[in-house]
Amino acid sequence: MIRRCAKNEFEHIYAIINDGAHAYNGVIPADCWAEPYMRVDELQHEIDAGVMFWCSEEGGALCAVMGLQNVRDVTLIRHAYVLSAYQRQGIGAQLLSHLRTLARSPILIGTWAAALWAIRFYEKHGFRVVGPKQKEYLLERYWNVPERQAEVSVVLADSAWQEPKAEDRASHAKVGFHFCLTDEPSQVQEVFCGGRDVTSHFALIPIRQRRVATTQEK
Ligand SMILES: CC(C)(COP(=O)(O)OP(=O)(O)OC[C@H]1O[C@@H](n2cnc3c(N)ncnc32)[C@H](O)[C@@H]1OP(=O)(O)O)[C@@H](O)C(=O)NCCC(=O)NCCS
């Protein structure tokens, strides 16, 4: 049976994610793996950010979860996990089909590039991996994942998703530059000017917190 997870099922969701995620161990880059894969506070953060979980119940116990998150003009499928012992029995497919009936906008899915089985799974359901430029754009626009995770991820889209034109992508691109206000070593700070209109986004960035200093980020 597929149903929406209840509020008091947090621990079940947590357990299923961390059991199912063992498939990644030794497959995704070592610096992206952790035990547990998702901490309690990370899961709580996701729920607070609007991820709604559905689950599959077999014999009275939950065996799989899958999340939906509405972000701007798209629907994201988030955190799809089937307990290891229940994988490859059609449960993920049932959950995915159910969630697709609930989506009111094009669906996007992000996963690890190394999780070939997951990519295959989504491709079997009509999703297509988007190109690298699209991926960068989509991850920045719709997700909030660390830069390293973005680097080693792929994004899949359903047929309702239409690639934005290059000029639309460019209008969202962060065109930014950094320069130093002072070279006094104890106070070195930089100004970052970015955004479509460079005057719209000024920030003082202590140099140690600087992410990547390039003339043009995209
Ligand atoms: C990916 C996942 C959600 C799919 O759910 P599922 O119930 O196992 O998948 P289904 O039984 O509905 O579909 C099976 C198909 O998915 C793919 N697949 C799923 N697990 C696989 C595996 N371990 N190895 C190879 N293919 C796999 C295959 O295409 C498979 O078809 P096949 O059995 O005919 O070869 C589930 O396997 C899972 O939780 N995996 C670990 C975590 C993960 O990768 N999550 C995706 C995060 S976006």
Image (cartoon, rainbow, N blue to C red):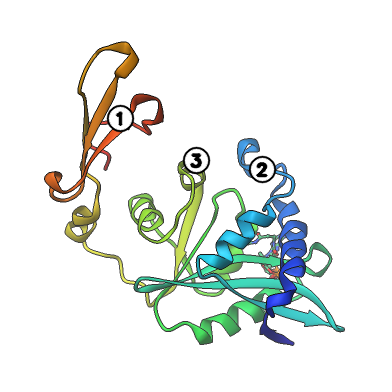
Q: Quadrant of the N terminus?
A: bottom right
Secondary structure of the residue carrying tag 2 is loop
Q: Nearer the viewer, residue 214 or 130?
A: 214
Identify the residue position indicated by label 1 in the image.
213
Residue shown at 14%/44% (left/top)? Answer: 198
Residue shown at 68%/72% (left/top)? Answer: 65
Identify the residue position indicated by label 3 in the image.
148
Q: Amino acid at mark 1?
A: Ala
Q: Is the CB of the residue bearing disc 2 within 8 angstroms of ligand 1?
A: no
Residue 9 is situated, as x and y percent measured from the top left of the image, at: 74, 74
Residue 16 is situated, as x and y percent measured from the top left of the image, at: 75, 65
Q: CA distance from mark 1 to mark 2?
A: 27 Å
Secondary structure of the residue carrying tag 1 is loop
Would you say the residues marked 2 and 3 are in contact, meaning their CB atoms lie under 8 Å apart?
no
Residue 31 is situated, as x and y percent measured from the top left of the image, at: 62, 36
Circle on res. 33: 2
Q: Quadrant of the C terminus?
A: top left
Q: Is residue 141 left or right of residue 29?
A: left
Residue 108 is situated, as x and y percent measured from the top left of the image, at: 45, 68
Of all residues, the one furthest to the right in this rendering is 59
